[in-house]
Amino acid sequence: MNPVAVHRVTFECVSRFALIRRESGDGFSGRRIVNSRGRNRPTRRLHAVTANLITSADSFEVGRLIGSYGFMNVTSYSGLQSGAEFEYKSDDIGRLKAQDIGEGGVKIRLYEGRISQGPFRGTPIVFKVYPGQRAGGVEADMMAANELNAHSFLQSSKYLPDNLLILVGGFETQFGEQWLAFRDGGKNSAADYARTASEKTSRARSQGVWNPYEKELAMKRRRNFVIKILQGAMKGLAFMHDKDRLHQSLGPSSIVLNTPAEREAIYLIPRLRDLAFSVDISPSRLDEGATSGALSEQLWQRATASGAFTVFEKRAFGIADDIYEAGLLFAYLAFVPFCEAGVMDSISLQRLLENTFRLDIEAVREYCSADERLEEAVKFLDLGDRAGWELLQAMLYADHRKRPVAEAVLSHRFLNGVVN
């Protein structure tokens, strides 16, 4: 599926979905979206691909700004240089899309809100706002279109897991911004949780001797919470792959949590979001040659470079690419929450894995075991006779053909009973 931006947004929809024509007459006024009486300042509703989506701006109320972020773009291992030959500069981060973790140029804003009309009146939502073409270029419109289409297709399934954020509707403002409305699945991401957990570790250690009993209890809760995040993320990813959709932007910021409290792990529901780079890998689409879209161009270039030429080889490569992203997510959640603030972050962790040790996870373990600052992370991955390291190696194999599918990751012993 290759949505192309025409004027503001044109959605290329799956044929069984009906298009809803744009309508004018709705304006954007302050915190409440209302009709602009006496003004000729039209807005355009998003094309909807299912009748269940709310496309009237009058049906929503906008609350406070929650925050903003750029999309993570994490791609497969491609034989990076190591040691002194590799020079990293902080201003390169936006250009690391081919082989590193980077933040894209399109900046997303998040707002609180609620549905103000109809049978779901009062339902809390979160608005995800894509900038118009003037600020975000054609790419922003294409990303909004792709995300809407991906959610609409997945939500047409008879069975929908809890681990996918639900799109309830959207609209376009007179300024060309695309506002997508999602059911409120929580304000905190897995990245927010990891930072908070790391800061708690720093505070506890700065206060002197950490009571061994309290420390073990805290680490036990933390291990359980992280496992539940990983389980939820992989359930969502398994569902997407079963429906022939890749995520392609999987990272700690793309998982939203309904609670960040480790004591409430029993109630935790992690949900996948950020489907702007999602790719349709159904055999029929790949057989039609639908591998030239701007949002998936790098994926298929890497697939070809890896020897994936047939429809089923490309499909398998795409799934393995998502698993690699999930492996980096696993590594992030295995290290960052268990270390003091500043000891490890996503960039330094990926450089450690890819550049320094060339994805040799056994060598990574040996290195980390010698650093007392990483002690709790090593203990976590050592559970079940080093089951965590085993799973991490499987997900991060340089040869994409050796990586497990999402269902196999879910059934691995590290995610099933090792942590208790």
Image: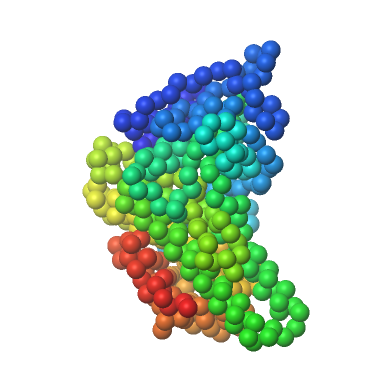
Q: Nearer the viewer, residue 70 or 16?
A: 16
Q: Nearer the viewer, residue 116 or 232?
A: 116
Q: Eyeballing the image, is 35 above or below 1?
A: above
**Is 296 on the left-hand or right-hand side of 188?**
left
Name the residue at 39% across, 30% down. Answer: 12
Question: Is residue 169 in sight in this rendering?
Answer: yes
Residue 362 position in % (x across, y down)? 43, 79
**Quarter of the image with the N terminus in it:** top left
Residue 50 position in % (x across, y down)? 40, 32
Colour mode? rainbow
Count of marks, rendered view: 0
Q: Nearer the viewer, residue 244 or 87?
A: 244
Residue 344 position in % (x across, y down)? 60, 69
Residue 60 position in % (x across, y down)? 60, 32
Residue positioned most to the front: 119
**Is 25 on the left-hand or right-hand side of 211?**
left
Q: Eyeballing the image, is 322 above or below 285?
A: below
Name the residue at 59% across, 68% down. Answer: 262
Q: Nearer the viewer, residue 152 or 340?
A: 152
Question: Is residue 85 in sight in this rendering?
Answer: no
Name the residue at 37% across, 74% down. Answer: 413
Name the residue at 26% across, 53% down. Answer: 313
